[in-house]
Image (cartoon, rainbow, N blue to C red):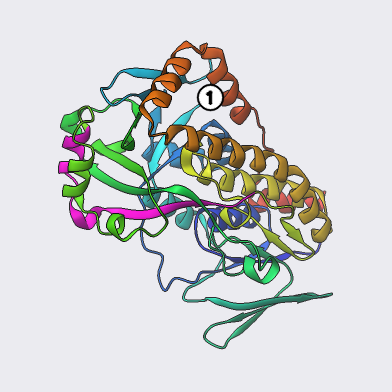
Amino acid sequence: MEQRHFTILGGGIAGLTAAIALERSGMCVSVFEAAPELRPIGAGLGLAANAISALDALGLKERTCAVARELHGLAILDERGRTITRMERPAGTGSEQYAIHRADLQAILLAELRNTPIHLGARAASVSQDGSGVTVHFADGSAHRAAHLIIADGVRSASRAFLLPHVKPRYAGYTCWRGVVHAPDLRVEQATETWGRKGRFGIVPLSGGRIYWFATVNSSGQNDRHRNFRIHDLVLHFADYHAPIAGILARTPDEGLLWDDIHDLAPLARFAFDRILLIGDAAHATTPNMGQGACQAIEDAAVLAGILRGEHDVVSAFQHFQEVRRARTKWVTDSSWRLGRIAQWEDPLAIRLRNGLFRMLPASINEASMRHLADVQFDPVPDKAAYIRMIAE
């Protein structure tokens, strides 16, 4: 079988994981990233059972889990630290859930790529295609001819705009701060998210005694006041919230504070455009309320590799990928959007009613949602040598 060639725009989690999946499947891959360097940026992220299954199919589970922190569920708390509800690992599923620092995952993905070049400082200025391929022109005046193009450059994808110029990121109505602190003495053993009148505060233990935290507050987009918040401002804002929130904030230096408004994409009707495919946040960015952003990107890679191994015609494979992934990613995006709206309520009466209702819900309701996410299987992606032997037979 003739070797197939793919160009990927974007060197984030979606782009790197897809490159690994395709490289392991014996395909020729090149990655182009707009940033001048791949720095270890970001904070923490969750790897739910579906992502762990996909990583296992890609041969990455063992290395990832070795540097991640296993979680046994998530507790939703009120401002005083009382439990509103718990989302535990579904009984009898063997589902695994982890939290990992984004930089640690990035390092694993970069180390796994062996034959795929990564071109940095390559910002796409235009993308066009014809019957024989795709041409990408870059901002520095250079051009690249690709047989097939995978766009994986995030929710604010500049490359997606060449295909869908009217699609813009959708502001969720709340802004977010994030940080990671080293605080083994705080002995944080479970992931929690506190819902209160002044916003939400999440605490997630990572490996090595680190804690990932995030805070969300209702806000107008690009609010200058919130843009200029420092740790002291967050300490005052969440002063009435339970321990150890104040202690975690106090250990975070201002230079370690990350801020951004929360956006997603309203579900798209198309991911596939003949020789071009959208994946990851460029295709189906979601709010972080279900912890599925990175998980769905990793799913994309495993699904795409499996489809391409079964179909020689890439255009048909891209269309098949769209058919398989659209409904699932739409469900995640829509569910996460609704959950975020409910979690950000500020009216005291509405909050009391919400918390009371959540406390009365049977555990089976939360388990059903987690089972729906976990109930997915991926065919193992063979390494390159095994794939070549397979197609030769």
The percent coordinates of residue 63 (x first, y second) are 44, 42
**Residue 247 in magenta?**
yes
Residue 242 visible in the displayed image: yes
Residue 327 in the image: above or below residue 169: above
Q: Amino acid at mark 1?
A: Ser
Q: State the SS at label 1.
A: loop
The percent coordinates of residue 69 (x first, y second) are 37, 33
Residue 181 falls in image quadrant = top left
Per the rendered image, the range of residues in magenta is 245-266
Most extreme residue toward the bottom is 141
Residue 380 visible in the displayed image: no
In the image, what residue occupies the spot 63% across and 48% down?
Answer: 300
**Residue 205 in magenta?**
no
Of 161 and 69, which appears nearest the observer?
161
Horizontal side of 236 relative to 294 (left or right) equals: left
The percent coordinates of residue 26 (x first, y second) are 68, 57
In the image, what residue occupies the spot 66% across and 68% down?
Answer: 165
In the image, what residue occupies the spot 49% across and 72% down?
Answer: 34
Q: Which residue is mark 1?
A: 95
In the image, what residue occupies the spot 35% across and 18% down?
Answer: 83
Of 41 and 27, which appears nearest the observer?
41
